[in-house]
Image (cartoon, grey):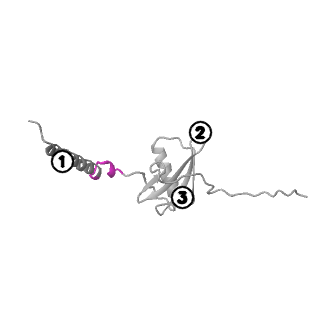
């Protein structure tokens, strides 16, 4: 005997509801994707710049990257009321890779962990020198 439309509809709603609950539990319970924290555990080192430098260095070295030099400066921006520290990482390549970092709780989160952290180019940490166009006499 063929099921009636109301039974098929009820079966579809029940199946969709069960699937929704299963997905919700997988995300909310330990082991689900929501329980995996993003970022790297903070290496406390004093101020924001020193902490960002030490923690990012530890994170990059834990990924077995060959870091030649790392320079970090505050850039005056913030993400969700947390100051952003911009770091320039030199891996020995012809270019320097930028990382914008934020300490949230006990984790250092970069713009690669969370794309919402803005990391556009800026001149933080640079001193601008202005030259006069008047000739010296």
How packed mark 3 is, by other alpha carbons closer than 10 Å (few <14, some 14-19, many 20 or more), is many
Does residue 26 belong to the magenta stretch? no
Horizontal and vertical percent position of residue 50: 53, 58
The disc placed on residue 108 is none
Horizontal and vertical percent position of residue 36: 34, 50
In the depicted structure, whether residue 59 falls above or below residue 49: above
The residue pinned by badge 2 equals: 93
Front residue (pair 94, 92): 94
Which type of secondary structure does the marked residue at label 1 adopt?
Answer: helix
Label 3, label 2: how many angstroms apart (C-alpha)?
Answer: 24 Å
Label 1, label 3: how many angstroms apart (C-alpha)?
Answer: 53 Å
Sequence-earlier tag: 1 or 2: 1
| Direction from residue 10 to residue 114 in the image, left or right | right
The residue pinned by badge 1 equals: 14
| Direction from residue 113 to residue 134 in the image, left or right | right
Front residue (pair 71, 102): 102
Verify CB contact (< 8 Å) between mark 3 and mark 2.
Answer: no
Q: Between label 1 and label 2, give the one nearer the viewer.
A: 1
Q: How many discs mark residues in the rendered view?
A: 3
Sequence-earlier tag: 1 or 3: 1
- Tell me the residue at 18%/45% (across/down): 9
**Highlighted magenta segment, given as a residue range:** 28-36
The residue pinned by badge 3 equals: 49
């Amino acid at each position: 005997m063929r099921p009636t439309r109301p039974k098929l509809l009820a079966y579809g709603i029940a199946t969709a509801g069960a699937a929704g609950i299963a997905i919700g539990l997988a995300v909310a319970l330990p082991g689900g994707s929501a329980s995996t924290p993003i970022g790297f555990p903070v290496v406390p080192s004093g101020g924001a710049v020193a902490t960002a430098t030490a923690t990012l260095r530890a994170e990059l070295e834990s990924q077995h990257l060959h870091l030649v030099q790392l320079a970090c400066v505050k850039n005056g921006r913030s993400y969700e009321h947390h100051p952003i520290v911009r770091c320039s990482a030199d891996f020995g390549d012809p270019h320097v890779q930028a990382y914008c970092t934020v300490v949230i709780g006990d984790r250092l989160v970069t713009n690669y962990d969370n794309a919402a952290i803005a990391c556009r180019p800026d001149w933080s940490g640079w001193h601008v020198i202005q030259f006069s166009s008047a000739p010296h006499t």
